[in-house]
Image (tube, rainbow, N blue to C red):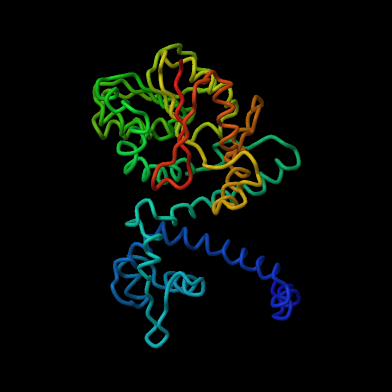
Amino acid sequence: MGLFLSKVMTLENINNNGFSERLIGILNNGALSLMISIGHKTGLFDTLSKFSSPETSEHIAKTAKLDERYVKEWLACMVVGKLIEYDSSNQKYYLPLEHSEYLARSAGLNNIAVFFQYISPLGNVEDKIVECFKNGGGISHSEYPMFQQLQDEETSRVFDSRLLADIIPLVKGLTSQLKSGISVLDVGCGRGHALNLMAESFPNGKLYGYDASKEGIEAAREESRQKGLSNVFFEIKDVSSFDEPSKFEFVTAFGSLHGQSKPTKVLQAIHKSLKNNGIFLMRDIASSSNLQENKDNLMAPTLYTFSTMHSMAVSLAFDDGEEGLGSMWGKQKAEQKLREAGFEENIEVYEVPGDILNYYYVARKP
């Protein structure tokens, strides 16, 4: 590779060819993505954010309880990647405040480093995705170990700070209904954190979570046990085929629809499960169904990659996978699917402060 690079990436070629320069930038940023993920997982960004002045690699490693040789190499990558500053006179490193506001866990919803953890598991299935390009089909959830846990870490930040304060109040009067005690279902509940938060805050209701993932349901049940909850129930269930007419006053689907093998049937089942005047709240990726309208979306390249290598692939993994919506199915198609499922009244679409990735759809069963 070194010989190849030396031939085609000469200084003259790069300076005279803006596209080759862009490609090298993409290559460098791809490599940095892995290192940013490591910085998040090891807590190095959190450690650096606590220092008020530059520190040596030895002191940084000791504070973070990590091996100094690896830390030093990681710091070098962060320096040349222009994420961390370096004072060569005393070989000390410093994370600027304006960078820590997006890299350290203390940044809360502003923390972008959390998203970089997805790159490695997606890379692990690259060869299988190539086979899907050749032969069609998809990849099962089991090929993405820890993926659901990553999703839980990402979304829990939003739910912890916004679910009760901003998301539920999108529906006028819903908080009061939940306090009085109504039946609630979370479809594709994953590890159940959002539902457990609701169950904890609204003890008079009965709340149910359905998901096909045994691992997810077990984690949801464990969290509910730790919280001492007796009003929340989690079940391993195919959400495209549940048949529980007029059982719930409130149903949610927090980002689970676009990965379903039969999303239209899921929405129909949701509509059927609601009582008259029942409310459906759906959270899904903020995008347009028209490609040209996504060109200015800063996250679009990442989201289309996630869609190709995960959301669409898992939805097509089963023989009965019908639609392969993908993450970027978009607002127009989402509204169309909701209407087709029976939600014919006005569908309201909201954005929630701090949740940069999603729209919130509110629909009511007549």
Give coordinates of residue 174: x percent, y percent. 32, 26
Towards the viewer: 139 or 84:
84
Q: Farthest residue toward the top?
A: 245
Quadrant of the rendered image containing residue 318 = top right
Up/down of 235 relative to 57, above or below: above
Residue at image location 47% in from the left, 22% down from the top: 237
Give coordinates of residue 104: x percent, y percent. 36, 60
In this rendering, would 130 be left or right of 217? right
Up/down of 67 relative to 42, above or below: below
Residue at image location 40% in from the left, 35% down from the top: 191
Towards the viewer: 303 or 366:
366
Quadrant of the rendered image containing residue 186 = top left
Towards the viewer: 227 or 257:
257
Towards the viewer: 301 or 89:
301
Give coordinates of residue 283: x percent, y percent. 46, 35
Total residue callouts: 0
Quadrant housing the N terminus: bottom right
Up/down of 282 relative to 22, above or below: above
